[in-house]
Image (spheres, helix red, strand yellow):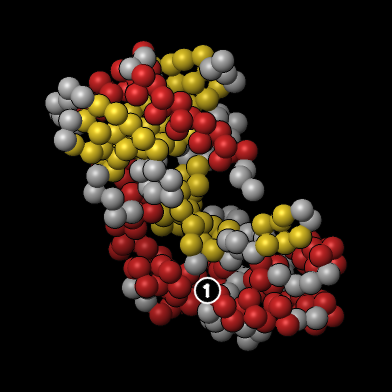
Amino acid sequence: MVSRAARRGFNIERRVVEAINSGDRIGLALVRAITEELNLPCERFSARRIPRRKSDIILECDDRVVGISVKLFRPDADYNHVERNFVDHYASRWGLPEQVYVALKLFVGEVDKEMRPIPTDELVREAKRMTLEAFKQEALGRLRRGLLSRRDYESALNKVRRYGRVSPGVLGKIRRLRFTQMDDILREAVKRYFRAEKKKIVEDVLCGDEAYLLVFLVVKRENDLVHYYIIRRREVVEIYSSGDIRFTRAGNLMLGEVVLQRKGGDHEVRGVWRDIAANQLQFKIRPSLAIRGREPLISELLT
């Protein structure tokens, strides 16, 4: 099931591709702005969408390829998901130090009853084996020890009662620790690592390994009016990697201007849980930061 926000994003991407390929007012303005920004001569051009990549759109200018990352937002919903994956994926990708690995496993809840890190598959197997009574007793124990809020305790119990089984996401939810609940040694290890690697990690979650991703297209939608902004890759990386490493009041982590949080919940299909992304690390940004103080390249009224 595709979310409403995702559908809006897909629609904007299709609109941009159609505008470029048809050579209409919007398309010509976008191509002109991109090629001028990159100092790239371009006589022939075409565009196409590429799903599941950092570059949402590929613009072909003569014999050159330009990747475009599209970030859509509304003033009342100023956020954009940029990436999510399991801790073990990032441990392999970034070579996480042991203390940072432990802290991130605790943060998402991929731990056993003794709070020791375990692989994703092991948590899935444990959830499948767990009885409702065993889950209730573990959750109650964590509530009494101050590791689980009353709200999260009741929410977790309601979910397992509703579906009649324990999902990996809800088990991770009762076992997780926010960064503000961890001891000072782990918190300092997290700060030290992400402070040293901040710019590299921010660029990685925004751009991946796509050297051809050269520009970001930020699209601001206000009711039926849409504003388009073009920003170069290096400027976007500088904007979102600026600022220190800090913990939020909600117990998440800020990497400059990128929010690192736990992807909660299990995806539900026709009233039945289907675990897709629960217990993953999720990175989000506020697109408005990239266009602060900028005038839109061009605007249009959507029909």
Query: Which residue is at a point 76% across and 60% down the rendered structure image?
Result: 272
Query: Can the viewer see residue 56?
Result: yes
User: Residue 198, position in %: x, y?
Assistant: 33, 57
Is residue 9 left or right of 212 when viewed as pictured? Answer: right
Name the quarter where the C terminus is drawn: top right
Is residue 7 left or right of 208 when viewed as pictured? Answer: right
Q: Does dot 1 land on a helix, a strand or a loop? A: helix
Query: Can the viewer see residue 258?
Result: no
User: Within the image, what quadrant is residue 212 found in?
Assistant: top left
User: Within the image, what quadrant is residue 288 found in?
Assistant: top left
Query: Which residue is at a point 54% across and 63% down the rendered structure image?
Result: 280
Is residue 98 left or right of 138 when viewed as pictured? Answer: left
Query: Which residue is at a point 78% across and 78% down the rendered structure image?
Result: 135
Query: Which residue is at a point 79% across and 72% down the rendered structure image?
Result: 165
User: Residue 77, position in %: x, y?
Assistant: 58, 35
- 29 versus 111 height, above or below: above
| Residue type indicated by callout 1 | Lys
User: Residue 37, position in %: x, y?
Assistant: 22, 28
Residue tagged 1 = 105
Query: In terms of depth relative to the viewer, which is nearer, 176 or 302?
Result: 302
